[in-house]
Image (spheres, rainbow, N blue to C red):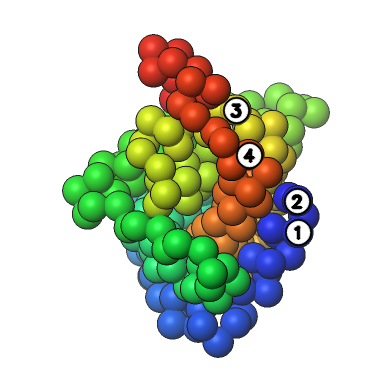
Amino acid sequence: MIFEAARLSLINLFAPETRSVFWKVLGLTILVLIGLWFALREVFALYVWPYFAAFMPTVPDWAGWLTFIFAIAAGIGLALGLALVIAPITALIAGLFLDDVAEVVEKRDYPGDPEGAALPLGRAMWESVQFLGVVIVGNLIALFLLFIPGVNLVAFFLVNGYLLGREFFEFAAMRFRTPLEAKAFRQKHKASVFMAGLLIAAFLSIPFVNLLTPLFAAGLMVHLHKAISRRDPSFTLAQGGSANHLGR
């Protein structure tokens, strides 16, 4: 079920019906990343380089190679910083284009099913802001864990697998359910949602390809929600837990 949803999402990436959304997602993601790259460079130039430059006069001539080593380390650091913000960027862009992706997928692959309803603009923006905040916090935790050998890579996949899986699935579910019902439905099927989230995290870890993460993740979760809904057509809110027990 999960791999079939992923396969269908990959096919949808390059389908003619999704071409306009494809270029919107790709273009906006690249523009945001370029802006962040220059922002990170400015932060480095203003707050990091002056300390190193003040230290350099005390370095002997024979140790000039340290400058070269530091330049390489700085470049790696900037690239790493950019890589860590891809997940929050994915969260932000997803909130803008999820309904566009979902509409295309539903019309193309599920023409006989009732169409989902797009979230009201205010609700969609609020969900996106919440999503963005949670992903930033989660990836800051993963950043600290990067310095623990053997834990860093696992932390990246677990944090992003859980967060991205949870939020993308709820976004897809809320086209057909109330927010409370969507959370309850995700809770009931949290194992499947988490496994699908790990696929999103794996997609996110592939350089350049990860620019299309919002498009892939949205399509994957639309297909997964459809598949789970057909396997569990009689779901009620009570089956997912009472409102008091539905934590984020």
Left or right: 95, with 66 as reference point = left
- Whether residue 69 is visible to the viewer of this picture, yes or no, is no
Label 4 sits on a secondary structure element that is loop
Q: Residue furthest top?
A: 244
- Whether residue 123 is visible to the viewer of this picture, yes or no, is yes
Counting other residues with Cα less than 10 Å from the Cα at mark 2, is it few (<14), some (14-19), or many (20 or more)? few
The dot on residue 4 is: 1
Question: Which residue bears the numbered disc 2?
Answer: 1
Question: Which residue bears the numbered disc 3?
Answer: 188
Q: CA distance from mark 2 to mark 3?
A: 16 Å
Question: Which residue bears the numbered disc 4?
Answer: 232
Left or right: 24, with 146 as reference point = left
Mark 2 and mark 3 lie on one chain; the one further toward the N terminus is: 2
Q: Are marks 2 and 3 in contact (CB under 8 Å)?
A: no
- For image coordinates 48% across by 20% down, the residue present is 238
Q: CA distance from mark 4 to mark 1?
A: 17 Å
Label 2 sits on a secondary structure element that is loop
Q: Amino acid at mark 1?
A: Glu
Place of residue 18 in the rendered image (x, y in percent of width and height, measured from the top left): 51, 78
Q: Amino acid at mark 2?
A: Met
Counting other residues with Cα less than 10 Å from the Cα at mark 3, is it few (<14), some (14-19), or many (20 or more)? some
